[in-house]
Image (cartoon, rainbow, N blue to C red):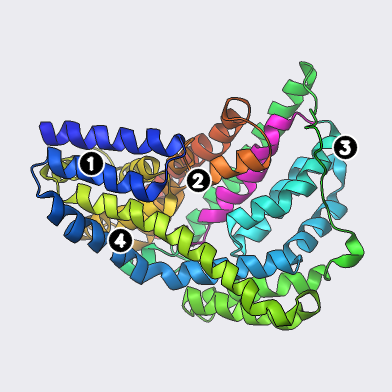
Amino acid sequence: MIGIFGMIFALVLLVVLAMRGWNILMIALICSSIVALSGGINLYDALLDSYMSGYVSFFKNWFLMFLAGALFGKLMDETKGAEAIANLIVRKLGASKAVLAIVLSCFILAYGGVSVFVVGFTIYPIALNLFKEANFPRKFLPASIGFGSITFAMTSPSTPQIQNVIQTNTLGTDTMAGATIGIIAGIFMFIVGMWWLNNAIKKDVAAGGYFTAVEGEQGAVSDESSLPAPVLSFVPLIVTILCLNLLKWKPEVSIALGIIVGVVLLNKYLNMKELSTLFGRGATGAISAITNTCAVVGFGSVVKTMPAFSVLIDAVTHLPGPPLIGAAIAVTVICGITGSASGGLGISIPIIGPIYVDMGVAPTAIHRISAIASGALDSMPHNGYIVTLLNICKTSHKEGYMPLFWLTVVLPAAACTLAITLFQLFPNLP
């Protein structure tokens, strides 16, 4: 019982300290120590063996993926290729369809493999100007960007985002696993999310809501003549997706080729003499991102050694009803605890994946359900991207989080329920 209480206390402390802005590396070590001491585990062994084994293993398996994604995002940001794509969509749809333009811009960039952080920073100035012109309440600005980038875009079949890749190592699947049901779930999220977002904005405006400016704030959108041609900007994204899904190349290799193609096609918008500096900044960002995730995975590795954890896993995997329900709950809860979809998947999939495969569940179904489930509770208030997005949009948690909660927590959970139902009814769909 002491071990269980210690584990629960450590999990709560992890969330609280993360929301207060503590460094995740320090939080993970503190919470791992609490788990070890409450479970009667030698502290030195817990940190040196369990914690560091999980940390190093995740780094070894996924550093190249994080690096490739960070370099690709840096390239699309520096060349303004991402902005060119967003501008094209906005120009075609117009300010009258401001929300749709923002959501589709985010979706295309995120689905193509651009880091969601780059998407947020790139789309914000464009979205800000659209919201000003339409006089929409600012509190829906982060929700529009978040909905487009971290729901159906991040977890749909064929995307090179890590939430759709991390399962491949354990389950032996590919990024198109559970494609038909994954696409249906993605379409469901898009339709329902757009309906909810548009209606929420209309109701707020009808009640007197309007856009509130922040002193000194300007939507710093580049002059269109300084941007690369949108058709050229699309090519690196298309090359990455085709190599990953048609040629079945490794994700890191597919993204690397997309980077090379981008450098060749968009070289006019790069200072080639400073290319090494640019990619050096991207590599630094990759190290920061993966070390934070590794810290969370290391904490999970210590939790795994607790007898109480085995009891919890046994309870989850023996829930009544379809086995996929237990898989979805396990992934969602762990992602929520860690505040990270990739970190939560890194902890949960190696543990529960083999269990459900042995129970006769199709690996493709586990892959798709875990991908969708990872996009639900990971968007809790302490999630790094949520905090960053609210800061970018200059909105507080009190003002801007609830629309994000409905669109990036409740909606993916509903889509996951739909996907589980479809897998039960139509288990043989490709």
Disc 2/disc 4 C-alpha distance (Å) = 19 Å
Residue 62 in the image, given as x and y percentages of width and height: 40, 68
| Amino acid on which the number 4 mark rests in the picture | Tyr
Look at 41% across and 54% down and name the residue there.
292
Nearer to me, 229 or 288: 288
Residue 245 in the image, given as x and y percentages of width and height: 53, 74
Secondary element under disc 3, as helix, strand or loop, is helix
Q: Residues within 10 Å of mark 4 (few under 14, many from 20)?
A: many
- Residue linked to disc 3: 133
Q: Of callouts 2 and 1, which one flags the residue occurring earlier in the amino acid sequence? A: 1
Q: Of callouts 3 and 1, which one flags the residue occurring earlier in the amino acid sequence? A: 3
Disc 2/disc 1 C-alpha distance (Å) = 27 Å
Q: Of callouts 2 and 4, which one flags the residue occurring earlier in the amino acid sequence? A: 4
| Amino acid on which the number 3 mark rests in the picture | Glu
Nearer to me, 272 or 404: 272
Contact between marks 2 and 1 (CB within 8 A): the answer is: no
- Residue linked to disc 2: 384
| Amino acid on which the number 2 mark rests in the picture | Gly
Secondary element under disc 4, as helix, strand or loop, is helix
Contact between marks 3 and 1 (CB within 8 A): the answer is: no
Residue 60 in the image, given as x and y percentages of width and height: 34, 71
Give, as a single range, the part of the protein colored magenta.
Answer: 136-164
- Residue linked to disc 4: 55
Disc 3/disc 4 C-alpha distance (Å) = 47 Å
